[in-house]
Image: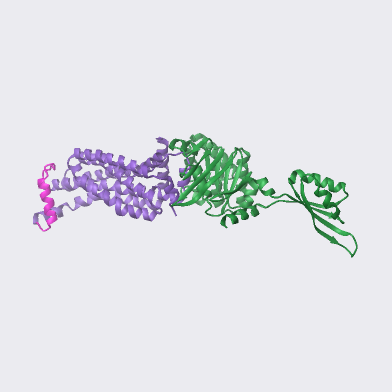
Chain colours: A green, B purple
Amino acid sequence: MIEARNLSRNFNGLPAVADLSFAVPEGKLCAILGPNGAGKTTTIRMLLGLIPMSGGTARVAGIELPAEDRAGAELRSRVGLLTETPGFYDRISGRANLELFGRLYGLEEATIRARSEQWLRRLELWDARDRPFATWSKGMKQRLALIRAVLHEPPVIFLDEPTSGLDPAVARDVRGLIAGFRAEGRTILLCTHNLQEAEQLADLIGVMRRRMLVFGPRTELTAGEPRLTLELGGDGTALAAPLGALPGVRSCVVVQSSRGERSAPAASTTLRLTLEDLDRDTPAVVREAVRLGAALQAVAPERTSLEEIYLRAVGEAEA
Amino acid sequence: MKRDTLLLFLRKELSDLRSNRQVWPAYMLLPLVAILLPLLLLALLPVLLQQGQTGQDAAVTMLMETVARDTSLRGTTLAERLARLLMRDLTMFYLLMPIVLSASAAALALVREKEQRTLEPILATPIRDRDLLLAKLVASVVPAILITWVAFVAGSLMTMAASWWAVDTIILPTSGNLVALLLLAPAMSVVAALLALRVSARFTDVPGAMQFTGLAVVPLSLILVALLGRPAMMWPLAGLGGAVVLGGVAFGLFRMNLRKFAREEILTNWK
């Protein structure tokens, strides 16, 4: 649904985006992370045909880019955009703003009215509908911007920092809405600084700084090198060898063995296993440990945090 | 071109104008002056005539000579002929009005969208550059023309009443006045608005755009008034010809605006 192939964009000879490639299949939510000036907004603008590319091609919602005037208009009718700032007219009401943008998206007046009412009620903005937009709170404004992004029911949505500057409660509501859009089967490209947001919402994650540094399914990226920690009661050091020999287990080492009184047996043992696939191999390891008589006290899978991935990727790019 | 888009922005601008009471005085000042000016000029008529007879003021003497030479001015008395000249040339003010009003509105048309951050969401809709520019042009020109025409009707009624009081005759608008108002004023207004629209697309701040428009676009447009206004008052056909020429100029300016309207420049070159 969204496919970027070697996208690049220079401003005054300096690369803002270089050789960027990624693909987001239909119905998936892809979060693009990156520091300020990484080229996230430029990427969105290129994919929406708002600014031309210096190189590369793309395909968004079935339209090939670069696109001519008419195809560009067709592309924009199939994509919804949420910009970092809401971008509405202050002096007219929230509903009048929606009507104006609805018309620009080519919707009939009756359709706009029906959809506006449905969304304004759903997002608890109905009572404020006729108040000038300037009098609305920041959270209300952002929710209205989300309504605008989906008013024409686009299959693809671009969200640029949707929760930036919002208080935690409003940010949570906005994230809930985005999750709802994804559940409706829309393809979403979410640019954000918020790692927690990306971890919570995304199917795919990309880390970019001019070029794509890391890209892949969230579950795979955060799995990293799959590790499993077993805490056993008593002396479990003898289990390291048989567990290490199991299929799917790359290594098994004793990382801690606490002793009670001198010459007494160990009070507890901690084993760390490196697995090929955490979800697939954990049950077999636990079964074998129990069969061998281990007094299992805790089983703790260890995943790589998104923060770790992000900082490593950006740090390497900067270096 | 979608007619809906034109009306959409026109309605939005009018609604914006309605809710922004602070700018009302600015929009009412010129029409008010235009309505009161005939009364003032005709009230000064006896003074002008007296000065003309004594020859104290060279400018007034020249005015009298103009009245004497101008064969298109009909009247039984010198006072009536002078009144007709003043009222005919007053129409120049009605040419100035739509230029100032439409250029001011057009100067804000895009730069204000940039400042409000509404331009990117607009450009993200399927609207095409040509439609957006035309919509902004119509939204700048139509209110200016309507205000001018309303002021002209009110001003003409005032002229009729004041001339009846001052020279015992009703002075009606001439065919030159009507051609100037109905054809030349809209054409000049469109040209000024197109120049200001280009300024608005280039600038990144409202004060800068307004300053440039006030110092460059409006004076340039006033030269047009000076060049075409008086001939149009005297010879309606000249007014018609001027309007046609300006129509061509406007078409060329619109094409230039369209060619230079770069979404990238607008999206990436603001504060």
The location of residue B158, given as percent across then percent down, is 24, 46
Q: Residue at x 57, y 46 (%)?
A: A190
The answer to whether one can see residue B196 in this image is yes
Q: Residue at x 31, y 39 (%)?
A: B251
Q: Quadrant of the N terminus of chain B?
A: top left
The answer to whether one can see residue A148 in this image is no
Toward the right, the furthest residue is A263
The location of residue B33, given as percent across then percent down, is 27, 51
Toward the bottom, the furthest residue is A262
- In the image: residue B181, left or right of residue A74: left
The location of residue A64, given as percent across then percent down, is 50, 37
User: In the image, which residues are magenta?
Assistant: B55-77
The quarter of the displayed image where residue A266 is located = bottom right
- In the image: residue A154, left or right of residue A202: left
Q: Is residue B72 magenta?
A: yes
Q: Nearer the viewer, residue A41 or A56?
A: A56
Q: Nearer the viewer, residue B192 or A70?
A: A70
For the image, the number of numbered tags is 0
Q: Is residue B102 magenta?
A: no
The location of residue A310, given as percent across then percent down, is 62, 53
- In the image: residue B2, left or right of residue A182: left
The quarter of the displayed image where residue A248 is located = top right
